Image (cartoon, grey):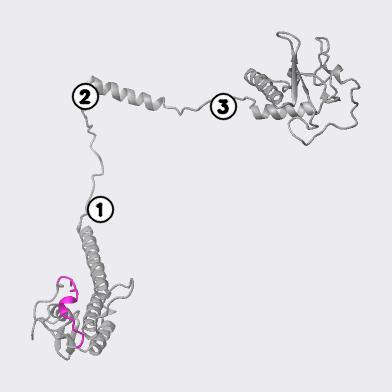
Amino acid sequence: MSDEMMDADSGLELDDVIGFEEDPPRDGAEPGEYNPDELLLNIDGYEGPIDVLLVMARDQKVDLAKISILQLTRQYLVFMDRAKAMNLDLAAEYLVMAAWLAYLKSRLLLPREESKGNEPSADQMAEALQFQLRRLESMKNAANALFRRPYLGNGIYTRGMPEGLGVKTDITWDITLFDLLKAYGDIRRRQEFATFELPVFSVMTMEEALDRVGTMLGKLPRKGPYSAWVTMSSLMPEKIKDPLYGRSSMASTFTAGLELVKQGKVEIKQDGLFRPIYMRATFVDRDRVGGPDSEPSDDIEQDSNPDAADGFDGESETSYAEAGV
């Protein structure tokens, strides 16, 4: 029989078929001696153990085209019924062998088809199956190696009473003074490590001051096109406990007043140096300071002499509370 055997219909050589790594020979039977645990086949073209048939098929020493898969399956099922009561592991090994023989013959009988899309080819599937078998064999070898190791309490025992001997360990450090100082510095740095956080100060922003001054001046009683004069300090928040917030409120309120003067909505006067600062709203455009929502009501008494509103002396200091708001 030629070693370069090829099926005439499919054109597939047995060299293209991936071989099967069989298990090592099982003990318990000498060559030529009958072993009841072996699956002996008697089919057209071959008579003998199935593992030998698998090796010969892999080495291309037997014509698989003459092997009847039907007879192989029937004889394997008969052997399986007899092996169920003996050894399931042995039956499983023979199942793998029979499956490989059926696979090898199907590869010879069926024509080779190119894989479509992402579908794995037959060679890739065979390589994957071979890898799984090799991994299973490695697991079995590792398990057998573990079981061959000595068991504590099974032939090997520990001593019940330990010896009262102490162990003295002398440690010699080969370092310099710089290494010692560096190690100490690293420990101190880890202990004193702290995340830097920026302090958050409670201050009055410019937007808050503009809204507050505009709203409070817009609620003052009108005297013609102007409102009553009030001191700047009366426009600041009351009962300020934080000195920083108090200074921030004064600066923001004064800056807001200057901004409203620039817009033509507020007038500011001061009687003299270091005297109180007064503010009043102007309603020339009939718009409330800080927004057009609140116009002064018409029922507020108008000053018959608008010029009198410009009169200002140090004795007419008016707070926001005295203005009737």
Q: Which residue is mark 2?
A: 175
* In this rendering, the label closer to the viewer, 2 or 3: 3
State which region is magenta: 9-24
Whether residue 147 is visible here, answered yes or no, is yes
Q: Residues within 10 Å of mark 3 (few under 14, many from 20)?
A: few
Q: Where residue 108 appears, x then y in whole percent?
A: 20, 83
* Front of the two marks 1 and 2: 2
> Could you say which quadrant of the image residue 253 lies in?
top right
The residue at the point 74 percent across, 34 percent down is 291
| Residue closest to the eye, 234 or 170 | 234
Q: Quote the CA–CA distance across marks 1 and 2.
A: 46 Å
* Cβ atoms at labels 1 and 2 below 8 Å apart: no
What percent of the width, then of the height, locates residue 301? Answer: 91, 26
Q: Nearer the N terminus, badge 3 or badge 1?
A: 1
Q: Decide which of tag 2 and tag 3 comes sooner along the chain.
A: 2
Amino acid beneath label 3: Val
If the image is split into quadrants, where does the N terminus sit? bottom left
Q: Are discs 3 and 1 less than 8 Å apart at CB?
A: no
Residue type at mark 2?
Ile
